[in-house]
Image: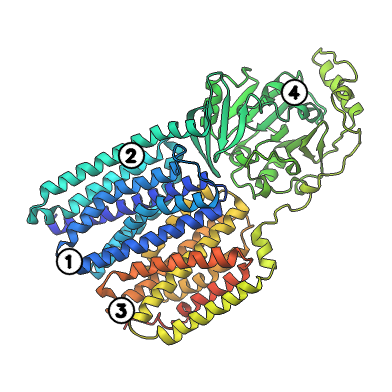
Amino acid sequence: MSNKGQAQYRNMFSFLITGYFVLLTISFVLRESIARFENPSLTTALVLFFLSLWSAAGAMLSFRANDHDKENKSFVLTGALIFLPPAALISVLSAMFFPMPAIGIMNGLPALVACAAFSTLWIGVFSGLIMAMLFSMKDHERLTGELFYCSGLIISGITFPLLSDRFNSAQAIIAMAGILVIAAAIFAGIEHFKRRGFKALLWTMASCALLLDACGVYTSQKLFHIYWKQMQPGWSYVKSINTPTGRMTVLDKKDGKLLVLDNGAPRWQIPQDSRKDIAGMLPVTLQPNSINLQILIIASPFSQIPQFLLELPYVAEVNLLCPYKDLIMVALSKEMLPLAPGRFFISSMPPEEYLQRADPRFDVIMILEPGFIRNPGNSQIYRLASERIAPNGVVVTLNTNNKQPAIPAPEDNFPPVGNYFKQTMPVPGCTTLTMAANNKLTGNLNELEDRLSKVTAFRGVIMPRGVLTTLYSLPENEQSPPSPSLVGDIFNGRLQKCVMLPPPLAVILLLIMCIAGYIAMRFFISRTGNYALGFGTFENGFFTMGLFLLLLIAYQQDKGDLYEKTPVFIGMLGGVAFGRILLRVPSLKTIMATISCLCPLLLYFNEIDFFYPILLSGIFCMAVSAGMAEEILAWRVTLMKNESLPALRYFGHTCGIIFFPFILFEANGVLLSVILLLLLRLPLLFSAMPYQKKS
């Protein structure tokens, strides 16, 4: 293979690895920030806002540097590619540990803004430099480079959730990707350095960068122990576990106590909290009125409920389901799980997947941890539970009217169990639990006493009369009324309220001013020359990021697992490069522009079962359309004299985040947001200025 062909393949590999590294780092920073602060939507908006701002600054810095010293362009860019990956690792550490407790604990919005601003600084500048470098290349090289760069984004977005769940140190994965970027930068610029005599400087820079990467990983491991020692005095750090909604952290004490935190808030303290809801287990197990019960519990592995159930003589088998294997391993190491071979079984898979595969028909299914359900807003779990219970079986869930304030589980979005069963009622003796079944349920203690005597006598155990009456003081009602929160739809998120409520007067006035300014810019100021091209690029970025963030907020409000899905969403924005290539296909531009115009309507379909794949497809199509529009703008010779195109796009991203999520959406302006987004895309559909054909 010729030297030219080898150089071309090296460049392709370089951009692929760089895109992979960029999204790894962005995803990790975003996920750590979400895990640190309570509001995922606001955190996502702020992180993407500062990321776009720093990216615009990085692209502009590259443009200015190249204008003044074009001869050393390769040296400057290669040096940036070597030093910025370790610097981007600082972003990871900042998101994980900012602010350090030893310096002073900051809470609320100031801490969130400071963390988002600093943790995205280095990776944002790096992204801007990469895009500016791409747009400084010749047309064919630029298209090829951006295609591989965006392919790296897509691959990274798909694989990062898998890698972070499989490996304990996600920052080590990022460091390894950074090393590959450093190596790619070395090979890309080595010929230039040889000619100018910079070879020794090159290897010195590379060695320093690799040392910084290694130190960053080592430092993060040590900081975790220091961080939690300061945050929770007397407790020592055990491990962290990624979940669909954030991160669980396990701490322990020398006396054997455990503390499990969900996104920094206490969730379980063992053994103090482990006996919760045990009082209601006896009446629940008597509802089927049969012996040899098979019971499925979706609960914490630290719960004492399985041990209590195994001591009942009429319980034949107990299955404990916890989707997090690491939590089960901690419980095993602390000897917190019951020893009952042949009667007690543990599984570590998502509850929906387990119920789809389960063969036995359980007599009792207990959903005691709604946070373990992968999509809390999806009622699939109740449909599956209704298919897996015996004819006289019962399903038990938490009563959302009696939530524990210290548990940040997403049961606010949990669907009504009464939609899938004929009867629901509170569990006698336990106000935090609700029973649901297709057969008759009873809270009559005398009837439950008769059932208890019958099932225990079969095993030769004599239970005295009056046990339940003595234990429980609830009224003996034959049929208690269903829990009101579990009969109707309990999801009344902000999105649905925003659709129905008109925006306030101040927002309407602001909107009128913005529309007037937009019309003035488009039809009077930005009609010809670089003004038109620059405004078109800004408008493209404004639409793309504004709609993207609104879709993420809509998804989070209904599904609740934005933490887990964000990398995949951002990776779909890599469709921009494919839009540049697909622009050559006849008639595809009009099709993709039409789809792009319809994408804002996805905000009204966030409750459908297949919203996630539809959303991914919509974001990818929107990115393809944005790439087509930007490629049409890039054809203009006057604009291609510099690398201002990515800077204007990132600046449009920044303004789109401010205008739509922070102004219109927060002020109940979802309907207006949808209308504006549709209007912004109509020029692309009808090929109006500045999206005209190649000049």
Q: Name the residue under label 4.
A: 292
Distance between mark 2 and mark 1 Cα atoms = 33 Å
Residue type at the position of mark 3: Arg
- Please state, as top left, top right, bottom left or bottom right, where the N terminus lies in the image: bottom left
Tag 4 or tag 3, which sits nearer the N-term? Answer: 4
Disc 1 to disc 3: CB gap under 8 Å: no
| Secondary structure found at label 3 | loop
Q: Mark 1 points at which residue?
A: 70
Whether residue 205 is visible, yes or no, is yes
Q: Mark 2 points at which residue?
A: 216
Residue type at the position of mark 4: Asn
User: What residue is rendered at 44% in x and 65% in y?
Assistant: 653
Which of the two marks, 2 or 4, is nearer to us in this view? Answer: 2
Distance between mark 2 and mark 3 Cα atoms = 43 Å
| Secondary structure found at label 2 | helix
Residue 206 image point, x, y percent: 20, 45
Tag 1 or tag 2, which sits nearer the N-term? Answer: 1
**Camera-side residue: 183 or 83?**
83
Residue type at the position of mark 1: Lys
Residue 591 image point, x, y percent: 47, 73
